[in-house]
Image (spheres, rainbow, N blue to C red):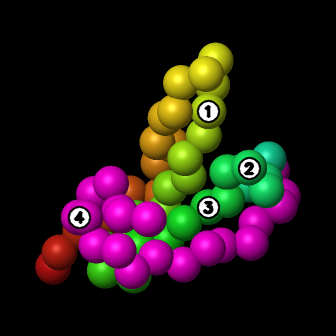
């Protein structure tokens, strides 16, 4: 899946089951390039991007 922040296609699936952040339907993804953590979820038949952790700021 393409990162919604930088467009990179290098992402990792994160296995987090505490706190209701992840489920089999909407697993967390982390961009290997910018560090953004997000998930794609469906609410009321509409697909939304849920940002969990913003991208790393460049130094």
In this view of the protein, can residue 56 be seen by the observer? no
Name which of mark 1 and mark 2 comes first in the sequence.
2
Q: Residue at x 44, y 65 (%)?
A: 1
Q: Residue at x 67, y 59 (%)?
A: 27
What label sits on residue 28 in the rendered view?
A: 3
Please report the bounds of the magenta region as a residue range: 1-19
Name which of mark 4 and mark 3 comes first in the sequence.
4
The residue where tag 4 is placed is 6
The residue where tag 2 is placed is 25
The residue where tag 1 is placed is 42
Tag 3 near tag 1, CB within 8 Å: no
SS of the residue under disc 2: loop
Residue lying at the far left in this picture: please name it: 59
Question: How far, Cα to Cα, is label 3 from label 1?
Answer: 14 Å
Q: Position of residue 42 (x, y in %)?
A: 62, 33
SS of the residue under disc 4: loop
What label sits on residue 50 in the rendered view?
A: none
Instruction: Give the number of the mark in front: 4 or 1.
Output: 1
């Amino acid at each position: 899946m393409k990162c919604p922040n930088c467009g990179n296609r290098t992402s990792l699936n994160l296995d987090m089951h505490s706190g209701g952040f992840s489920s089999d339907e909407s697993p967390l993804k982390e961009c290997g390039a910018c560090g953004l953590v997000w998930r794609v979820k469906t609410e009321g038949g509409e697909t939304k991007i849920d940002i969990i952790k913003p991208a790393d700021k460049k130094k």
